[in-house]
Amino acid sequence: MTDGLHVEIEGRVMILTLDRPKANAIDSGLSQALGNAFTRYRDDPSLCCAIVTAAGEKFFSAGWDLKAAAENKDAAEDYGPGGFAGITELFDLDKPVIAAVNGMAVGGGFEIVLCCDVIVADEHAQFFLPEVKVGVVPDGGGMFRLPRRVPESLALEMLLTGRRLSSDEALRLSLVNRVTAKGGALAKAKEIAAEILQASPKAIRAVKQAHRLTRDLSVEQAYRALRSGGVPAYDRLRASKDYWEGAAAFSEKREPKWEDD
């Protein structure tokens, strides 16, 4: 463990576990450790999926460690690579990340979750952004990402009042993908990761990069970008053996043999 972070590799999956009792709050050291881990994940072709979870049952993460920040203002915002928590500004991470939320995701903890592609939550999990009540704002991406994930009116209410969202509410709003019994989020996240691993790593990267680069475009503009080299991962997929391997495997009644990313 380094600076409150456990990093485990299970096959082609990296599992990151926040572990800073009592609330898994994130200080500069943990933020930098997360940045190093996410950068390693991004750059390692043998890794195809990452899961972010936390130790304990009450908190996924209480967000930025305000006490540590107040005691050491000079280093308080030395987040390291990838911005706050190592992922909020790691914009070129074109590999899937799953959040296994096993408790309250507060402030910066919720902002980590909002960066993830798939979100699994224990039934007792809660999500909220209370920053305005302590004189700051959710500038770890909460102000930008939350209105893209839930209705704007609800996002603004949560941002302005700190309203809490239960896991059931989050499921109804499609903010989270699955809700599990208490203690089941990590196991379900691993199941989803196993499904992802069945696919071509190059195809997975192409899907995520295409989404990232075209999400704010019209469908027509997105097609133009795709056909004109605007999504490099798509072009790499088409030029690879993987592009025809799936069809060949189906025809030959065998499992596909994908290339490393």
Image (cartoon, rainbow, N blue to C red):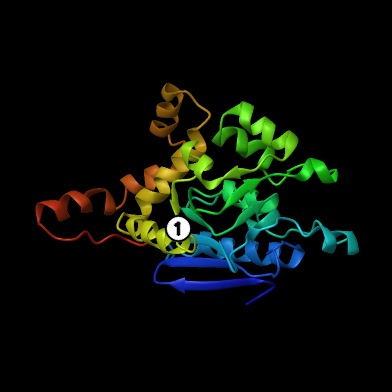
Residue 79 rendering spot, x and y as whole percentages = 74, 58
**Is residue 202 in sight in this rendering?**
yes
Q: Is residue 41 left or right of residue 254?
A: right
Badge 1 amino acid: Ala
Along the viewing direction, whichever of 233 and 75 lies nearer the viewer: 75
Residue 137 rendering spot, x and y as whole percentages = 78, 41
* Residue at 44% from the left image edge and 39% from the top image edge: 210
Residue 53 rendering spot, x and y as whole percentages = 55, 62
Q: Which residue is mark 1?
A: 181
* Residue at 53% from the left image edge and 29% from the top image edge: 216
**Is residue 89 in sight in this rendering?**
no
* Residue at 61% from the left image edge and 28% from the top image edge: 152
Residue 184 rendering spot, x and y as whole percentages = 45, 62
Residue 166 vertical placement versus 17 (above, below): above
> Quadrant of the rendered structure where residue 232 is?
top left
- Check the picture and name the quadrant holding the C terminus: bottom left
